[in-house]
């Protein structure tokens, strides 16, 4: 698509373009949206890349994300009253995570350690009926607090990748996560709508019960769309500390919601 055509389409109300595309499925409009929102793919890939090992190339994340963008363009319904950017970011992240899962990049030892910590947190909090401190988790693991915090740094990429898995329930119409705050389409099965609302309530409640700083990290990162560095500036802590807080928050959420998820879906 040449620049002249892009400039021409830029003058047209975007809502009108989406409505036209929904009816015509014109390749020219699809190409226009891909070009217009390509920077969004780099932005999302940049956020995902933070905390990932050096073996994960940024350009690879971008290429995975492009598939998510195209999928978002093809599936976007302008009549749902949501912004395409919000919808697309969810699909782009999802495509990147799906591809990373398929190549199984996380070493088995790291995966097992993440699961162990998640289980320890879940069992301790279930037993004590409250949020547990780092010292208590470290003691239960039989390691020092310094070793525990070092371990959190190693696991940061794992928790990023695992986020969508927390409440992933199946196909496109049957998933819910922190990343997905979109309203369900009106024609969705009423039983699924009720189920999604029930899970949404559990998620909100679980987030509210997080320790204050962990809760702020979740809100600032996923809802306010700040980078880890920007969150560090807000909380007056290092970027590394933000990464640790994020990892602990995800592990707490996974532990608390794991049992609920199994009861609800199966």
Image (cartoon, helix red, strand yellow):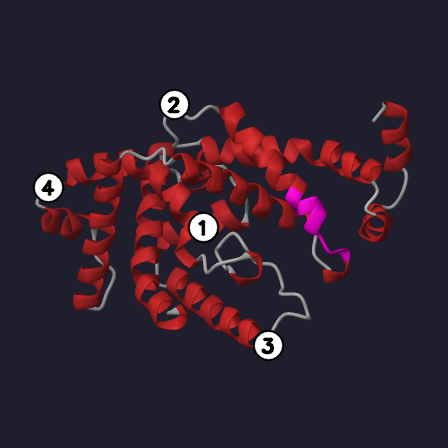
- Residue furthest left as drawn: 142
Q: Earlier in the sequence, mark 2 or mark 4?
A: 2
Q: Which of marks 3 and 4 is nearer the N terminus?
A: 4
Name the spot of residue 195 as percent of width and height, x first: 50, 73
Residue at (42, 68) in percent of width and height = 202
Name the spot of residue 140 as percent of width and height, x first: 11, 51
Q: Name the residue under label 3.
A: 190
| Label 2 SS | loop
Estimate how packed mark 2 is, as few (under 14), some (14 to 19) or many (20 or more) residues with alpha carbons within 10 Å.
few
Estimate how packed mark 1 is, as few (under 14), some (14 to 19) or many (20 or more) residues with alpha carbons within 10 Å.
many
Q: Quadrant of the N terminus?
A: top right
In depth, the one of 73 and 182 nearer the eye is 73
Q: Is the magenta stretch mostly helix, strand or loop?
A: helix
With 13 as the anchor, is 187 left or right in this view?
A: left
Name the spot of residue 67 as percent of width and height, x first: 61, 37
With 25 as the anchor, is 127 left or right in this view?
A: left
Q: Earlier in the sequence, mark 3 or mark 2?
A: 2
Spatial separation of the CA atoms under disc 1 and disc 4: 29 Å
Q: Which of marks 2 and 1 is nearer the N terminus?
A: 2
Q: Mark 4 points at which residue?
A: 143
Spatial separation of the CA atoms under disc 2 and disc 1: 22 Å
Q: Eyeballing the image, is 53 above or below 259?
A: above
Name the spot of residue 207 as percent of width and height, x first: 40, 60
Tell me the mark number nearer the camera, choosing from 1 and 3: 3
Q: Give the range drawn in magenta.
A: 71-78
């Amino acid at each position: 698509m040449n620049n002249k055509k892009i400039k021409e389409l830029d003058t047209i109300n975007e809502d009108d373009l989406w409505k036209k595309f929904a009816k015509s499925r014109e390749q020219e409009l699809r190409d226009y949206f891909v070009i217009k929102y390509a920077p969004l793919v780099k932005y999302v890939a940049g956020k995902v890349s933070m905390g990932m090992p050096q073996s994960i190339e940024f350009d690879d994340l971008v290429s995975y994300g492009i598939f998510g963008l195209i999928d978002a363009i093809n599936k976007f319904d302008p009549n749902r009253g949501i912004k395409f950017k919000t919808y697309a970011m969810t699909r782009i992240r999802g495509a990147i995570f799906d591809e990373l899962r398929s190549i199984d990049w996380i070493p088995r030892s790291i995966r097992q350690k993440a699961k162990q910590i998640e289980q320890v947190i879940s069992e301790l909090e279930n037993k004590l009926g409250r949020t547990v401190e780092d010292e208590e988790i470290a003691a239960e693991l039989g390691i020092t607090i310094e070793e525990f915090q070092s371990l959190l740094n190693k696991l940061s990429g794992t928790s990023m990748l695992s986020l969508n898995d927390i409440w992933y329930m199946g196909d496109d119409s049957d998933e819910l996560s922190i990343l997905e705050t979109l309203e369900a389409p009106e024609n969705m099965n009423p039983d699924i709508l009720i189920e999604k609302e029930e899970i949404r309530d559990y998620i909100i409640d679980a987030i509210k019960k997080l320790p204050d700083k962990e809760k702020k990290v979740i809100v600032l990162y996923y809802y306010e769309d700040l980078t880890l560095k920007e969150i560090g500036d807000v909380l007056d802590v290092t970027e590394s500390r933000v990464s640790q807080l994020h990892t602990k928050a995800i592990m707490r959420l996974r532990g608390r919601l794991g049992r609920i998820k199994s009861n609800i879906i199966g």
